[in-house]
Image: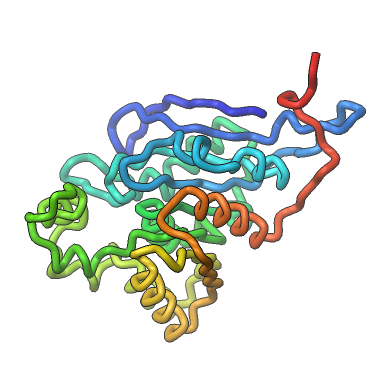
Amino acid sequence: MTLLTVNAMSQSLMRTVTFNVYLPSDKVDMAGNLIAKPPYKTLYLLHGIIGDQNDWLVGTRIASVAKHHNLAVVMPAGENQFYLDQPDHMNNYSQFIGQELLDLTRNMFPLSHKREDTYIAGLSMGGYGALHNGLKYHDNFCAIGAFSSGLILEEAIASTDDSPFPFQRRDYYQAIFGDLSKVLDSDKNPTYQAQQLSKSSAAIPQMYITCGTEDSLLQANQKFVDSLVENKVAHTFETWIGGHEWAFWDKSVEKFINWLGLEDDHSGVSSDNIKG
């Protein structure tokens, strides 16, 4: 496979950032002819809390699934920041994920510049990030995959600083989301974002949403889906037995890529299965 680790300067974050890129660029037929021809359709794939740009490669079969569908995948790091803009700290993750990362990778690699060839997805914190940035930058993405999404704003509003888990404390939530008394009626709330877009003429990305029946986030995800139904926003919601775990997310990302209806191909061989 063609897997690259990139270090590049980000203007949005004012520092060098690291991200992984999978490309189907070595996929050829038995005669040596290139099968996966650029420009490549591209998935920007976001990890969860306490994770990094390597998580999807370690925890799932994303590289083999992407290769099967001739799909490029870009995997950035979110550093526990929920992929939100925090301009006071020069941590403009939303700007980075929603626009700058697309520009960077399209300049570096033969990726499609078309909205209809560009997708964003993520798990847990990354599911929230995919929803937030997919809706905020709806002109850039045609589809959103949201798996066990960290839709925790109501939990944040009710939080205290007594939790033994640092990422459930009120001071953390305030640092990430700002004034918690205003967050529900802001673009930091994907429910609010979808409601506002539904009232406009904007092209809303198609959404594929999953959550396990044993996941503590199921109720929050169901509530978000109910709002999409109420506002007549197109989406697919699937749930099956599973918790907040990699086995569920591995299946989710494969189902999402299949749901996109991308070309698949069994005839190719690549450098990782050619023996010298």
Quadrant (top left, top right, bottom left, bottom right) of the C terminus: top right
With respect to residue 216, does 196 lie above or below? Answer: below
Q: In this rendered view, identify the residue nearer to me: 247 or 113.
A: 247
Question: Which residue is pictured at 43% across the width and 25% down the height?
Answer: 7
In the rendering, at what x and y percent does residue 238 appear? 54, 70
Q: In this rendered view, identify the residue nearer to me: 141 or 21.
A: 21
In the rendering, at what x and y percent does residue 189 appear? 30, 67
Q: Is 140 placed left or right of 160 in the picture?
A: right
Quadrant (top left, top right, bottom left, bottom right) of the N terminus: top right
Question: Which residue is pictured at 25% across the width and 68% down the height?
Answer: 186
* Image color mode: rainbow
Question: Which residue is pictured at 12% across the width and 69% down the height?
Answer: 181
Residue at the extreme right of the image, as rendered: 31
With respect to residue 23, does 237 lie above or below? Answer: below
How many numbered discs sit on the rendered protein? Answer: 0
Q: Quadrant of residue 225?
A: bottom left
Q: Is 78 placed left or right of 99 in the picture?
A: left
In the rendering, at what x and y percent does residue 223 appear? 37, 77
Question: Which residue is pictured at 62% across the width and 38% down the height?
Answer: 63
Q: Is 239 placed left or right of 40 in the picture?
A: left
Q: Is residue 103 visible?
A: no
In the rendering, at what x and y percent does residue 128 appear? 37, 58
